[in-house]
Image: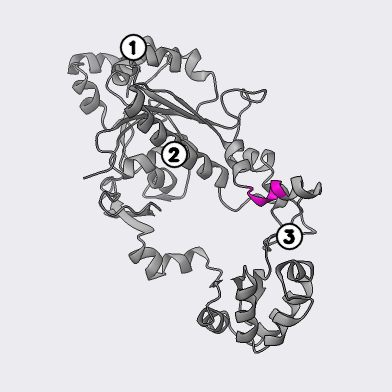
Amino acid sequence: MKALQDIVVLDLTRVLAGPYCTMMLADFGADVIKIEIPVKGDDTRGMGPFVNNSSLYYANVNRNKKSVTLNLKDPKGKELFLAMVKKADVVVENYRPGVMDKLGVGYDVLKEVNDRIIYAAVSGFGSYGRNSARPGYDIIAQAYGGLMSITGEPDGEPLRVGTAIGDVLGGMNLTIGVLMALHARELSGKGQRVDVALVDSVISSLETGTQRYFASGKLPRRIGNRYASAYPYDSFKAKDDYFVIASGTDKHFEKLSAAMGMPELAQDPLYCDTESRKKNADSLKEIIEKWTADKTVSEVCKIIDEAGIPVAPIYNCEQAANDKNIVEVREMLVKVPAPVKHPDAPKELTVIGNPLKMEEAPCVYYKAAPDLGENNEEIFESLGFTKEQLEAFRAEGVIN
């Protein structure tokens, strides 16, 4: 059994936030039909990195999907799309708000065609509010949502998180919204609109950042890798590299002090409780790094881990990709069949696994990201259009 095997999703999204959502749904069995612009397709088809001229960016978040091409600016393209909507459960899009309405296929039109349709949209600023018409990308969301203001070194410039976390958070929230709307439909029999903004998603991730401001009236500042609510919860330098400790409680610090051979630290008024350790974080970091200066990361992590304190090396991508627990046990790097376009092309591509693990209805990686328009005949003929009609559509540029 697949958790979403009876759900049909029409995927009008491109690049990352929207495709991340529909990837999550496809991994758990939803029949996701990606609707792309003829000839061009999703922008990420032209973005690297590439293997044998195939984009790994596109491949990673579009596995398990089908692809059709459709020119929604053409009345016949709109006709084809509305025929698909009649049999679909979910429409997902990440155009700027208002674009779908201008094309004549916004939510108000679609719900007349199918009142059970769930219309899920993700955009930079959401579908209403004074910024709704503005374009929004990940770095815009990280900046406008406040995340960059608290990311970086104390004396450095504001920093974007090293991945498109605003897009990923937006995609995750849209997935949650779709699943809640599907459940609500079981209760009411009606579909609804789901609206997610990248900026809202970033703001919701700030957790104690905004609460510290409300409590003190002072702006949270950039504090590097430190955690504002506990210490030592930071990165530290060993003989050969950096590592992190996550000592979040007084009990943790007692164990850490003992493991370092300095149990008296836990009784020192400068470090005896969380507030004192936060206030004297600089001097405590010096003490810890003096202890680690003649030890490797591996040695330090072994000592601290055996004491029951959360600790970890700071992996690079190569190290993470070669950790058997990550790759094999947790299945966070998986293989999918590769499109065969060249005799020397690899038979498999490595993509990032789904973080959700379900015992009775696990995700399945069964299909590579589709070629542009790969499923045109299959999908449109199933809706009753003939081969002759499809050839005419193709000649007119309605489909590929």
What label sits on residue 176 in the rendered view?
2
From the top left corner, tell me how far across and down residue 72 is, in percent: 40, 17
* Disc 2 element: helix
- Mark 2 closeness class: few <14, some 14–19, many ≥20 residues within 10 Å: some
Look at the picture and state if 14 lies above or below 115. below
Q: Which residues are magenta?
A: 206-211
| Residue drawn at x 63%, y 41% as measured from the top left | 203
Amino acid type, mark 3: Ile
- How far apart marks 3 and 1 lie (CA) works out to 56 Å
Instruction: Examine the rendering and report whether any part of residue 345 can be seen.
Output: no
Specify the quadrant of the image occupied by residue 378: top left
The residue at which mark 1 appears reads as 76
Q: Nearer the viewer, mark 3 or mark 2?
A: 2
Sequence order check: which comes first, mark 3 or mark 2?
Answer: 2
Quarter of the rendering occupied by the C terminus: top left
- How far apart marks 3 and 2 lie (CA) works out to 32 Å
Left or right relative to 212: residue 140: left
The residue at which mark 3 appears reads as 223
Viewer-proximal residue among 392 and 82? 82
From the top left corner, tell me how far across and down residue 98 is, in percent: 54, 18
